Image: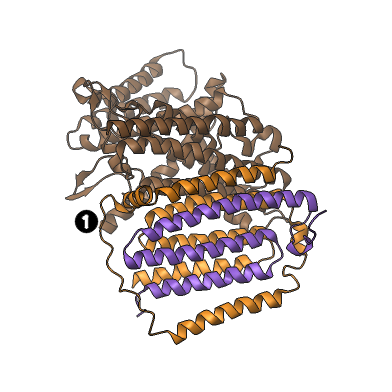
Amino acid sequence: MLAPVTTAHYLVLSAILLLIGVVGILTRRNVIVLMMSIEIILNAVNVNLIAFARNLDQLEGQVFAIFVICVAVAEAAVGLGILIALFRNKETVQVDEIDLLKW
Amino acid sequence: MTETVFFYCFAALAVAGAILTVTMRNAVHCAISLIASLGGVAGLYLMLHAEFLFAVQIVLYIGGIMVLFLFVIMLVNLEAAARERQFHRSWVGGLLCAGGTGAMLAWFWLRGAGTLRLPPAVQPTPREGGNVESLAMVLFRDYLVPFELASLLLLVAIVGGVMMAKKRI
Amino acid sequence: MNFYLLTLIKMALTALVLLTCCAYAVWVERKVLAHIQLRPGPYRVGPHGLLQPLADLIKLLTKEGIVPSYANPFFYLLAPFLAVALALTAIVVIPFTPEFELFGVRTAIGLTDLNIGILFLLALSSLGVYGIAIGGWASNNKYSLMGSLRSSAQMVSYELPLAMAIVSPLLLVNTLNLREIVELQNGFHFGLLPKWNVFASPVPQALGFVIFLIAAFAETNRVPFDLPEAESELVAGFHTEYSSMMFASFFMAEYANIITICCVATVLFLGGWHPLWPAEYGSDLVPVVLLAAAGLMLLFHAAQAARRRKWDRFTFPVFGVLLLGLAPVFLIPVLKPVLIPFFWFVAKAGFLVFVFIWIRGTLPRYRYDQLMRFAWTFLFPLSLANLLVTGLVVALAG
């Protein structure tokens, strides 16, 4: 028999997702994948918030998760806009090739 | 029992999708792995009795943000990028940093195994009108100012996105 | 009878009926379009082409399914499956009739009764874009890619007015459960005008209904918004490379989407199973009269000597007698509480499906920039205004 799921399970899962996201951000070259890694991290945060909301039987955690999603949406919109502008000017999406302050 | 099985299924989906996202070569494959991961997380929300967030996760994240990602990936030609190497030169350092963070978390976890005292999970109080209505009460009554600020943030994001992406304003 | 058995039976029945409806929607569409364009339409297979869907199915099943050599096989095969699965899933939350007693079990036609039904529908409709986007990308063909790019932009844009149009009737009924939404639209103004959300008392949602329908055309990729598959520009758009059952899946998904979205419009705006006018004035007799009239007309045409088509002499009387026999079924008191609401639901949804076809036969296709400008500068502000006015009036009245 499997042990029943506790809040700790969700916390561990959230930590794992966070680490995967950090690895993605620190090692990949592709800007789009970097932004996807940020989404993974934000999701890890959300899992954490909602797990605690369930644990404490309060809705504030869910409200905060909504705000986090809001921020994620804003980040994706502006980030992808920047990406398109970047691609138009530099013809590349690799972060380590974008190393000039001005061109 | 079924709850545990579901938890491990969704958790496996979320983690596997996330791992594939940071390792796949082709950006479209990354995006679709991330969609799978987000779907797994949405399932977890449902298990945590957050039905509204489940819907928001699917409508906004999977149906909105990820479509935007896919759109941009299809718009900018990434075939050259997929053929180049995927990890930049200092990937060892990055991996070490992430590993260090993970080790620290694990160390805390092991050292404090007995000391993490969460209050025991209470049964969710049945709220009138279900999750959506009670969430709306909290969001629009207690957190109205942050909500309005969030709308301002979104407005800024819209203007910023247009500014950035448009060739000539 | 236990719950699981009943659910299984209902699932099987719903799947059967929905798939048959999808197949015959194609036939109806071809017939209606043909008559709009003054030509007879499919006529060869069966009487008046009635077996045409079967013939199409056999043709599509026996064709070779080609995977282009440059395509990405996994996603190429995943896309049609995704499209049809998501399109067919949405039907589970639609309530077709009120609850009734069957062998001692309270049940209804309709599979589940989610208390977040609307959110579920929105979630599924927002996922619908993936079948098209992935299919177009995986085909590795510039026309397919253009089609899927257009469709992702279009569906994301039109989802906003769609969602806004859904929200305003929700403000009136104050629930997310589709069954409760229908039940709350019960009754009549002045004993005559139905209290559907289109005619709701503080703010009639007629504008919301129109916005919903327009956005629904775009969401289901129908003319005048069928840019993703614009034949004259993109060969066939996102399904250029598809053949055999994979193509049939996309086709089926499109029709399943139309049927579902018509059902949703019926539930949200047109009062679900509630009749158009009160039963005191004989709204229960409508199906009987309609069926009997249709049957009599067929018999009349069968007797007319002017008809020279070979098979009509046999098929017209057969169908006429069938329809005449079906008419009294709606008078049986035991079946009445199920069949009459079901008839009204199907009649409304069917009329909306007909409107979809009608518009396809009437309007030309939009240009892409017109499509986007229409969504963002006209439809979305209009839906927002509708939502704001509804919210204000509900707040002041409530």
> What colour is chain B?
orange
- Picture coordinates of residue A70 (x, y %)? 50, 52
Q: Nearer the viewer, residue C366 or B165?
A: B165
Count the marks. 1
Q: Nearer the viewer, residue C156 or C236?
A: C156
- Picture coordinates of residue C233 (x, y %)? 70, 34
With respect to residue C119, does A65 lie above or below?
Answer: below
- Picture coordinates of residue C213 (x, y %)? 47, 31
Q: Residue furthest bottom?
A: B111
- Residue C377 is left or right of residue C17, and the answer is right
Q: Residue at x 63, y 59 (%)?
A: A35
The quadrant the C terminus of chain B occupies is top right
Which chain contains the residue that carries disc 1? C
Please rate how many residues cluster around mark 1, counting C-alpha atoms within 10 Å: few if below 14, some from 14 to 19, many from 20.
Answer: few
> What colour is chain C?
brown
Q: Residue furthest front?
A: B145
With respect to residue B130, does C356 lie above or below?
Answer: above
With respect to residue C165, does C295 lie above or below?
Answer: above
**Where, by quadrant of the figure, is residue C290 drawn?**
top left
Q: Nearer the viewer, residue C301 or B37?
A: B37
- Picture coordinates of residue B93 (x, y %)? 69, 77
Q: Nearer the viewer, residue C317 or A13?
A: A13
Report the amino acid beneath label 1.
Answer: Met
> What colour is chain A?
purple
Name the residue carrying label 1.
C1
Q: Is residue C66 visible?
A: no
Dot 1 lies on which element?
loop
Q: Residue at x 36, y 74 (%)?
A: A6
